[in-house]
């Protein structure tokens, strides 16, 4: 019968040999020269939003433009009270002069990220929207003619995106004497002029 020390030595010998071989191939003389510790992953930087709050909407369009687009309206405009003014602000002008009615609405909305703003823009700019060049990062125009009780109304909506913000312009009008709507060209040109002024104010304050 073998003695206990010899028996233990026989059982431990393979373990010692394997451990020694492992050291030789990983840290010893046979270890590769180019082995380096894996670099820790760098934390992803959170994208910085371009705009942190919407600008003053009633200052988006100057008095001369208001007088041209909405004759008879108070040039100061009226800001609409919203639940979250740090995210969205809107100003409107409206007036009836010699049976002609006009309404202009300027709205700014700021999102947490550009990706969210892009998704919102895509939703508003879908369908039969007409793209507008050189207006923010992207812009589109929609025009709709409606008739109710034989009274026509034409409305143009411009939606423009700059960074993480959207600018929405709504401009419409009707003639209560002729019961006809203004021409498509006049409504579209008015909405686009207001949109360019509003986007310019937004980007100037960035």
Image (cartoon, rainbow, N blue to C red):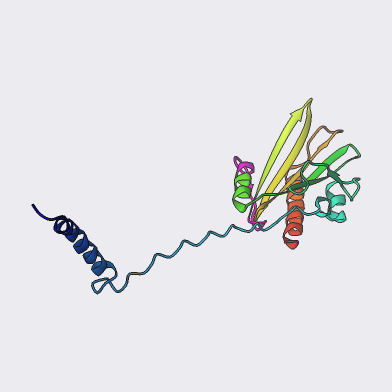
Q: Residue at x 74, y 40 (%)?
A: 155
How many callouts does the rendering have? 0
Q: Residue at x 24, y 69 (%)?
A: 24
Residue 143 placed where, x, y %? 69, 41
Q: Is residue 132 visible?
A: yes
Q: Is residue 167 left or right of residue 23?
A: right
Asked where in the image residue 127 lies, by quadrant, the reply is: top right
Residue 134 placed where, x, y %? 65, 58
The region drawn magenta spans 123-139
Residue 111 placed where, x, y %? 67, 49
Q: Is residue 92 above or below residue 39?
A: above
Magenta stretch containing residue 129, yes or no?
Answer: yes
| Magenta part, dominant SS | loop
Asked where in the image residue 29 lies, by quadrant, the reply is: bottom left
Q: Residue at x 73, y 51 (%)?
A: 192
- In this view, the residue in front, 187 or 116, is 116
Residue 160 placed where, x, y %? 67, 51
- Given the current orientation, which residue lies at the most extreme top position? 149
Q: Residue at x 76, y 49 (%)?
A: 86
Magenta stretch containing residue 191, yes or no?
Answer: no
Q: Is residue 94 left or right of residue 107?
A: right
Q: Is residue 106 visible?
A: no
Q: Is residue 98 left or right of residue 129?
A: right
Quadrant of image for the C terminus: bottom right
Q: Is residue 13 above or below residue 74?
A: below
- In this view, the residue in front, 68 or 86, is 86
- In this view, the residue in front, 82 or 6, is 6
- Given the current orientation, which residue lies at the most extreme left position? 1
Asked where in the image residue 64 lies, by quadrant, the reply is: bottom right
């Amino acid at each position: 019968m073998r003695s206990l020390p010899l028996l233990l030595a026989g059982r431990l010998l393979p373990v010692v040999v394997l451990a020694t071989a492992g050291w030789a191939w990983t840290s010893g003389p046979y270890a590769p020269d180019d082995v380096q510790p894996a670099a820790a992953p760098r934390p992803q930087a959170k994208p910085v939003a371009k705009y942190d709050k919407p600008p003053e909407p009633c200052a988006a369009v100057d008095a001369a433009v208001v007088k041209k687009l909405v004759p008879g309206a108070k040039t100061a405009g009226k800001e609409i009270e919203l639940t979250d003014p740090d995210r969205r602000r809107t100003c409107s002008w409206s007036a009836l002069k010699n049976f002609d009615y006009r309404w202009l609405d300027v709205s700014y909305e700021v999102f947490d990220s550009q990706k969210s703003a892009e998704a919102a823009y895509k939703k508003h700019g879908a369908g039969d929207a007409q793209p507008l060049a050189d207006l923010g990062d992207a812009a589109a125009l929609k025009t709709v003619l409606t008739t109710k009780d034989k009274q026509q109304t034409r409305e143009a909506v411009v939606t423009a995106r700059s960074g993480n913000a959207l600018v929405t312009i709504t401009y419409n009008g009707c003639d209560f004497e002729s019961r006809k709507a203004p021409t498509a060209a006049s409504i579209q040109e008015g909405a686009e002029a207001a949109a360019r002024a509003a986007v310019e104010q937004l980007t100037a304050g960035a």
